Amino acid sequence: MSLSLRTTRSLGLPKPSPGGLWRAMQQAVAGLGRAGALRREIDRMDDHMLSDIGVSRAQLGFEVDRRGFRQ
């Protein structure tokens, strides 16, 4: 019986470094924080302010939910 080790082919993508992964995670967490702040700010707007920028509360709720912004 012969054992052979299979090697995987590289797709030409660089191997991620721990520092790069850490920065990517920090950016993702910061983006979630900004999205939450945006959602809270939008929730504080009254209907007149929303109509001034050309959206209704229903449209805004749909877009926010579609894009996955959560508090």
Image (cartoon, rainbow, N blue to C red):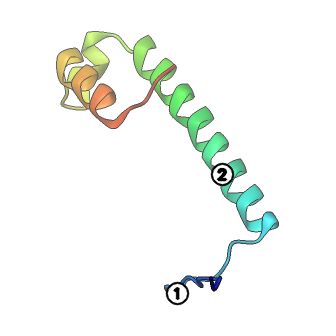
Q: Nearer the viewer, residue 43 or 66?
A: 66
Q: Furthest residue to the front?
A: 1
Sequence-earlier tag: 2 or 1:
1
Q: Residue at x 46, y 23 (%)?
A: 70
Q: Quadrant of residue 19?
A: bottom right
Circle 1 crowding by C-alpha within 10 Å: few under 14, some 14–19, many from 20? few
Kind of residue sitting beneath label 2? Gln
Q: Residue at x 33, y 37 (%)?
A: 67
Disc marking residue 18: none
Q: Residue at x 68, y 50 (%)?
A: 25
Query: Residue 31: x, y in percent?
Result: 58, 43
Disc marking residue 9: 1
Left or right? Give the position of 66 relative to 9: left
Query: Residue 41: x, y in percent?
Result: 49, 21
Q: State the SS at label 1.
A: loop
Q: Residue at x 61, y 47 (%)?
A: 28
Q: State the SS at label 2.
A: helix
Find disc 2 in the rendering and name its residue: 27
Q: Quadrant of residue 34?
A: top right
Circle 2 crowding by C-alpha within 10 Å: few under 14, some 14–19, many from 20? few
Q: Quadrant of residue 1?
A: bottom right
Counting the numbered discs, the total is: 2
